[in-house]
Image (cartoon, helix red, strand yellow):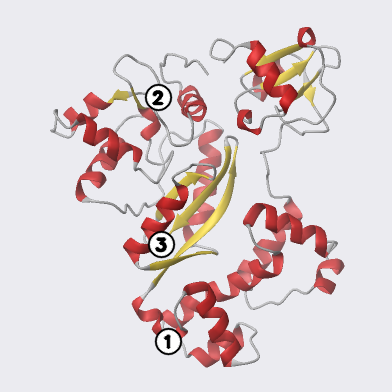
Amino acid sequence: MEAAISADRMYQALVEKDPGFEGVFIAGVKTTGIFCRPTCTARKPKPENVEFFSGVRDAIASGYRPCKVCRPLEKPDATPEPIRALIREMELTPSIRIKDQDLRLKGFEPATLRRWFLKHHGISFHAFQRMLRLNTAFKKIQTGEAVTGVAFEAGYESNSGFVDGFRSVFGVSPSKTKTTGMIDCKRLETPLGTMLACATSKGICLLEFSDRRMLETELVYLSKRLNASIVQGPNPFFDRLEQELEEYFEGKRTDFDIPLDLIGSEFQIGVWEQLLRIPYGKTRSYKEQAEALGKPLAIRAVANANGLNKISILIPCHRVIGSDGSLTGYGGGLWRKEKLLQLEGAPIRLSLF
């Protein structure tokens, strides 16, 4: 990593607390013996007192200990365990109505929790709670349960209130759910940043880094293609996805077993299925991918389909590089592509940041 990015550039990022460098490097401070993430708010040392590492493992091996301010051993923006437990409680019993008084009894300050949910989920805690209830209600109605009974179980005192809340989220009344579908989504934390996962009853249909520019376009496409609403809520595949991703980033998994739901044209799906055949630790060029598909002249079309892959990491589009061995475009950012290939031990030519 030191060869790919100059020490001056990394030090500038450290001074500016640039979040774009989270996961790119770790800074070791010689005078204190601690190591920090790029966004650490502690006082910045002089350039000559800093050395840079590609990850925490190298920093620890060099004798540094983790900073207590920025906590570099934790995932960026990781959900605190008390909040994870709260979310699990709501997912297991979606009909529960947790009020501010209940939150205080559980050790939470309602205003602080509200700000955390607004920052990380875009909605308040109580709105998140309502979303889970409506998510469960949607699925029950689709299995044939009566709307009135479902509304009561969801904690609504009137059928009209339930219908209004349901329509505001899904865009249709409960009675019309038979003609529409639902895609569950969940925020995940990885060593390379926050990701958004979406799943249907068939499998994972989207896994993207939350700062990908095309993310909103991809979500709109999925919604229209499947005639479905995308709503935060539990899905049987999410726990398995988190487990497999954790094993992958720890270097303990080289293949993913979780079912995928590929949404795209016949040609795009063919390209993505070919991506799945690239072995862990190996790379291919776009030309080689086109040849593997039996379409040697369709290099540009293959590259375009590669870029439209909506399931990062699981469908390893990061393993496709330029014919000269250079790293080419990646929706999650070239630095992430480089990190993924380094994790897999693939032979690459380091990029110039």
Which element type, helix, strand or loop, lies under badge 1?
helix
Is 307 situated above or below 119?
A: above
* Distance in Å between CA atoms under marks 1 and 2: 50 Å
Residue drawn at (29%, 41%), measured in percent from left and top?
272
| Front residue (pair 123, 69) | 123
Picture coordinates of residue 144, whole percent (x, y): 41, 86
Which one is nearer the viewer's eye here, 180 or 292?
180
At 72% from the left edge and 20% from the top edge, which residue is drawn?
27
> For mark 2, what is the residue?
281
| Mark closer to the chain start, 2 or 3 | 3
Task: Using the image as rendered, state which of residue 148 and residue 324 is in the foreground.
Answer: 324
In the visual, does 73 lie left or right of 244?
Answer: right
Hey, which quadrant is residue 172 in on the image? bottom left
Q: Secondary structure at mark 2?
A: loop
Q: Residue 63 location, x and y as percent? A: 76, 15
Q: Can residue 205 be seen in this snapshot? A: no
Query: Looking at the rendered structure, which numbered label has been put on residue 200?
Result: 3
Which residue does the image show at 39% across and 64% down from the upper left? 201
Query: Which is in the foreground here, disc 3 or disc 1?
Result: 1
Amino acid bearing label 1: Ser
User: How many angstroms separate mark 2 from mark 3 (CA)?
Assistant: 30 Å
* Depicted 212 relative to depicted 19: above or below: below
Q: Quadrant of the N terminus?
A: top right
- Crowd rating for badge 3 (residues with CA inside 10 Å; few <14, some 14–19, many 20+): many
Q: Give x and y (percent) for residue 47.
A: 76, 11
Task: Tell me the residue that label 1 is attached to.
Answer: 175
Q: Residues within 10 Å of mark 1 (few under 14, many from 20)?
A: few
Which of the numbered marks, if any, corresponds to residue 3? none
Q: CA distance from mark 3 to mark 1?
A: 21 Å
Assign a secondary structure to mark 3: loop
Mark 2: which amino acid?
Answer: Gly
Q: Are marks 2 and 3 in contact (CB under 8 Å)?
A: no
